[in-house]
Amino acid sequence: MAEHAKPAWDFHGGLHIEDHKEKSLGAPVREAAVAPRLRIPLQQHIGNAAEPIVQVGEQVLKGQLIARASDYVSANLHAPTSGTVVEIAEQPIAHPSGLPSDCIVLESDGDDRWIELPEPLADYARLDPADLRERLRWAGIVGLGGAVFPTSVKTNTTGRVVDTLIINAAECEPYITCDDRLMQDQPGDVIDGALILQHIVAADQVLIGIEDNKPRAIAALRAEIEARGIANLSLRVVPTKYPSGGEKQLIYLLTGLEVPSRGLPLDVGILCQNVATTAAVADAVLRGRPLISRIVTLTGNGVAAPGNLRVPIGTPIQSLVEQMGGYTAQAHRLIMGGPMMGFALPSDDLPVVKGSNCFIVASEDEIPDPAPASPCIRCGECVKVCPARLLPQQLYWYARSRDFDKTQDQHLFDCIECGCCAYVCPASIPLVHYYRFAKTEIWAGERERQKSDHARRRHEFHDARLKRQEAERQARLRKKKEALRDKPATGKDPKKAAIEAAMKRVADKKAAQNQEQEKET
Ligand code: SF4
Ligand code: SF4
């Protein structure tokens, strides 16, 4: 029976919307077939792109490292199956910008043969957290809830105190059910991963936050927790309201603590991890497996048999659709992510990446095409629903007029791009597009500023070096002059004296040679 939650705290705004989740929840997660060709983008995470360490023509095994993290904030990539690297080049990928990106293209050999994996770390509780973070870094684990931030970096809380680890199992966006199915099918992995993460960040307690529209997942997790008799780990059921899975919103719902503007959960002693990331952590630590696949929801009226598949990273979306019975006659739009935060894709010939939690093949009436925008009528509806307590219409005005300083004064970076404002806007203004545009422009400006600061510092350094070198040269000259001045006076010009001495040496040598010749004759 469904469990209805009454939390002590509730965040401002949000929406109660039809969740459409039952469509894809019917069956357990199936393993997807390996497609003949996988396209693995080098940039699937926040931070720098990974650097390929394989060559075209090279044979690789499943789980083999094929691209190395190029920086601290970057992530390793491993081969999702065995086969041959046939290309390393720019390829189209699923990204809101629509721009292509460098990918490793792998042709499967059909054997799906694993490389030898590192030792499982079953005794993780005795290990140093730094060694466990190193395992997560090796495994290429990133946040699977959409943030795709490298987990080894996020869990490096050295010098900060973590009171509470929150496992985000809210999965609040309509249609998406990959986390729900994961919790139903693998509750043990979720709990294992939560305990490993608790050890890594030394959290006093773990709270798993889940919406009350997931009764089967709640039951599965509760049974697992009770069977193990785990202390300091509890399941907290919250009411279904979008976007309760927003990090700040969930923290408030579970603890009543507010993360400061532009601050981090760590500022209030909290670290959040998505539930699928948690299971991937268990896989890496307890089985030595890298992140080479993920659970993906494929749903909507446009697909014949909606459901969830565990999919090798790099699989083309069209292959998933085929495995779910193909398109129906109603198929109209393809969306990656949910209807609130996702974006439309131009084609299904694009690869699944670590951050792909859902694809919706929507019919025309299910998720209609955006209506043409009309002018803002200042109705204030967007303000009522904003969970970040922002003034969306003001943000829109400033972003539209490119007054980026003002957007920052209005806390643009507290906007979680949940889409609630755009959803209720009677003028159909694509508000989130404006906020994304403003953020991108500010970041680009910031990068330019950093670049010019760097160039200015280099110039100043170069200038200072030249001045220092000139000063050193002057000092050497001065020293020489002083040395000459301090030499005992001979009454002669030192230059002239040196020439005379040289001439005398030559004359002495010549005289010695003449004497030798005379002796011989
Ligand atoms: S909901 Fe739309 S029309 Fe209403 S104030 Fe906000 S931006 Fe303007
Ligand atoms: S998208 Fe941003 S401004 Fe709009 S409701 Fe969500 S948090 Fe508020």
Image (tube, rainbow, N blue to C red):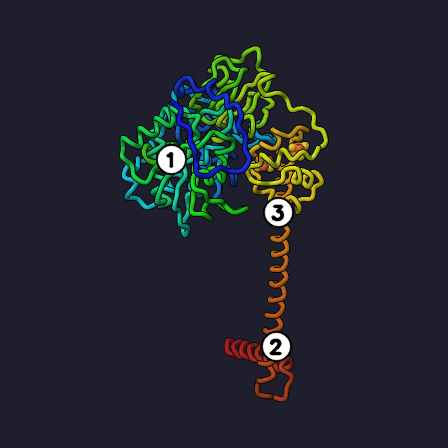
Residue farthest along the top direction in this orientation: 329
Q: Residue at x 60, y 44 (%)?
A: 411
Three-letter amino acid code of the residue under disc 2: Arg
Mark 3 lies on residue: 446
Lower position in the chain sequence, tag 3 or tag 2: 3
**Residue identifier under label 2:** 478
Look at label 3 and name its amino acid: Glu
| Residue toward you, 2 or 84 | 2
Spatial separation of the CA atoms under disc 3 and disc 1: 34 Å
Give the quadrant of the N terminus: top left
Q: Can you give x and y, in whole percent of width and height, for residue 514 in the image?
A: 56, 78
Dot 3 and dot 1 residues touching (CB under 8 Å):
no
Mark 1 close to ligand 2, CB under 8 Å = no
Secondary structure at badge 1 equals: helix
Mark 3 in CB contact with mark 2 (< 8 angstroms): no
Q: Earlier in the sequence, mark 3 or mark 1?
A: 1
Q: Secondary structure at mark 3?
A: helix
Q: Residue 358 at x, y = what percent? A: 50, 25
Measured as percent of width and height from the top left, residue 104 is found at 50, 29
- Looking at the rendering, which quadrant does residue 513 occupy? bottom right
Residue 365 sits in which quadrant?
A: top right
Identify the residue under disc 1.
281
Q: For marks 3 and 2, give the one nearer the viewer.
A: 3
Q: Earlier in the sequence, mark 2 or mark 1?
A: 1
- In this image, 437 relative to 185: left or right? right
Label 3 Cα crowd, 10 Å radius (few <14 / some 14-19 / many 20+): few
Q: Is residue 327 above or below residue 171?
A: above
